[in-house]
Image: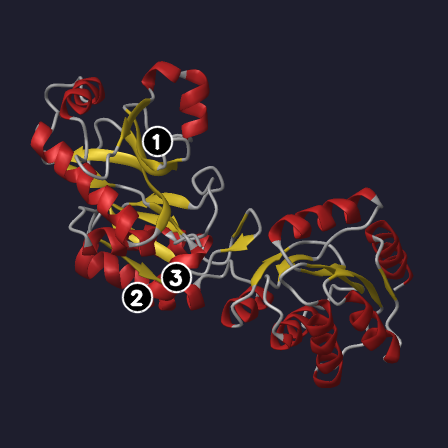
């Protein structure tokens, strides 16, 4: 899950990471009130959407007075940025910027340790820096036992802050990095990014913030529940799947997929595309044989009005195929929908599963290509 900027900065402030004086509002009138009573002028009005490119799209502007705030906030609220409608804006104090830096924490998969990526050329996409100024990208590995290696980090510090007048102390810089790493660990994040990072009154400040959370860790963080329910990027089906403890990702097609195992799910979607169809979702019911999972999966699929046909693709190892079939039969009794179905079920107790499905007039095969070609045809006819 991606946190919006104001949400990520709330996390930062709780970790004593400095941010500008700012707050989120949802109306132009509240923006004016906030600017007048707290933030002051000039101030920056920033669209809060889970995509990049806000500045280029006109979603970030400076306001010099109350009239500006009212006009700019009215323009930004309701605008669409890469398909996301702006419903929230951040009103932030305008701070003096000498230089913009880049900083992020990600997992280095080879070493299985956090990697700090830094650059003195911030304010643009890291991909752009890496392409045009590769010598401006610095990396520091964080060791779980000793932390940062001082001899290496000091060299990076010197390269980052070549402007003596703006340079923060090495101690301040290292403490700031440790705070960012702690957020990465404590919040089960997969990415913590500041772009730009600035030096303001001799302290590091996060002028922008981006945090990606590991969905598998959300159950351990009740403090994020308010963000889960308020972020517009989660579809109705994804919310239902999260509540049912199923792995689901919405896609743009019209063929719903119910599969056990992430690898098979990916192969299934590739095969649908190969035969000219378009998957409506990634849905992994996992290795469990519990029929209730199938019932919940059908509820999610039936709620998607774009779906024209359903493909069930089960390879039973740990998963018992007859339990899947029982769950599917129960689901048809409890979930109301009228969609054509194509089934491929093979593996543990598959003969029993086929018998159960044929009793309720559901066609089933053991051949994946046959099932996929059939569902593509059904979706086109639908």
The vertical placement of 312 against 207, above or below, is: below
Label tally: 3
Q: Quadrant of residue 39?
A: bottom left
List x then y, in percent, for residue 325: 74, 73
Is residue 245 shown to the viewer in this render?
Answer: yes
Q: How far separated are the C-alphas under marks 2 and 3?
A: 9 Å
Q: Residues within 10 Å of mark 3 (few under 14, many from 20)?
A: some
Q: Which mark is residue 218?
A: 3
Describe the element under mark 3 as helix, strand or loop. helix
Q: Which mark is residue 223?
A: 2
Tell me whether circle 2 and circle 1 mark residues in contact (CB < 8 Å): no
Which quarter of the rendered picture does the N terminus lie within?
bottom left
Q: Give the camera-side residue of 69 and 25.
A: 25
Q: Nearer the viewer, mark 2 or mark 3?
A: 3
Residue at the disc numbered 1: 123
Q: Earlier in the sequence, mark 1 or mark 3?
A: 1
Describe the element under mark 1 as helix, strand or loop. loop
Looking at the image, residue 5 sits to the left or right of residue 259; the answer is left
Looking at the image, residue 374 sits to the left or right of residue 136; the answer is right
Identify which residue is drawn at 18% across, 40% down: 178
Identify which residue is drawn at 84% across, 58% down: 366
Q: Give the camera-side residue of 130 and 33.
A: 130
The vertical placement of 372 against 167, above or below, is: below
């Amino acid at each position: 899950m991606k946190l919006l900027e104001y949400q990520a900065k709330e996390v930062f402030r709780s970790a004593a990471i400095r941010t500008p004086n700012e707050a989120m509002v949802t109306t132009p009138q509240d923006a004016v009130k906030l600017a007048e009573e707290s933030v002051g002028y000039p101030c920056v009005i920033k669209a809060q959407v889970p995509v990049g490119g806000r500045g280029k799209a006109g979603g970030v502007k400076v306001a010099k007075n109350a009239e500006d705030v009212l006009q700019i906030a009215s323009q930004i609220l309701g605008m669409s940025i890469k398909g996301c409608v702006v419903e929230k804006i951040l009103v932030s104090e305008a701070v003096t910027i000498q230089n913009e830096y880049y900083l992020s924490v990600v997992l280095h998969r080879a070493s299985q340790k956090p990697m700090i990526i830094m650059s003195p050329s911030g304010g643009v996409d890291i991909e752009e820096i890496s392409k045009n100024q590769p010598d401006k990208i610095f990396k520091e590995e964080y060791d779980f036992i000793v932390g940062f290696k001082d001899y290496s980090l000091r060299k990076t510090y010197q390269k980052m802050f070549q402007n003596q007048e703006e340079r923060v102390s090495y101690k301040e810089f290292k403490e700031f990095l440790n705070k960012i790493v702690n957020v990465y660990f404590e919040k089960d994040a997969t990415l913590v990014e500041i772009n730009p990072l600035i030096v303001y009154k001799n302290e590091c400040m996060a002028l922008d913030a981006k945090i990606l959370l590991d969905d598998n860790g959300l159950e351990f963080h009740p403090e994020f529940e308010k963000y889960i329910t308020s972020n517009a990027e989660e579809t109705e089906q994804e919310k239902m799947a999260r509540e049912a403890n199923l792995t689901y990702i919405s896609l743009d097609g019209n063929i719903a997929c119910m599969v056990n195992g992430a690898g098979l799910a990916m192969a299934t979607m590739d095969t649908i595309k190969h035969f000219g169809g378009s998957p409506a979702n990634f849905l992994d019911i996992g290795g469990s044989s519990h029929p209730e999972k199938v019932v919940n999966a059908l509820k999610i699929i039936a709620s998607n009005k774009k779906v024209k046909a359903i493909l069930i693709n089960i390879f039973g190892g740990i998963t018992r195929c007859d339990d899947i079939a029982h769950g599917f039969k129960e689901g048809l009794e409890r979930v109301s929908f009228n969609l054509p179905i194509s089934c491929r079920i093979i593996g543990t107790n598959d003969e029993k599963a086929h018998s159960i499905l044929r009793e309720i007039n559901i066609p089933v095969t053991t051949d994946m290509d046959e099932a996929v070609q059939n569902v593509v045809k059904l979706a086109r006819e639908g």
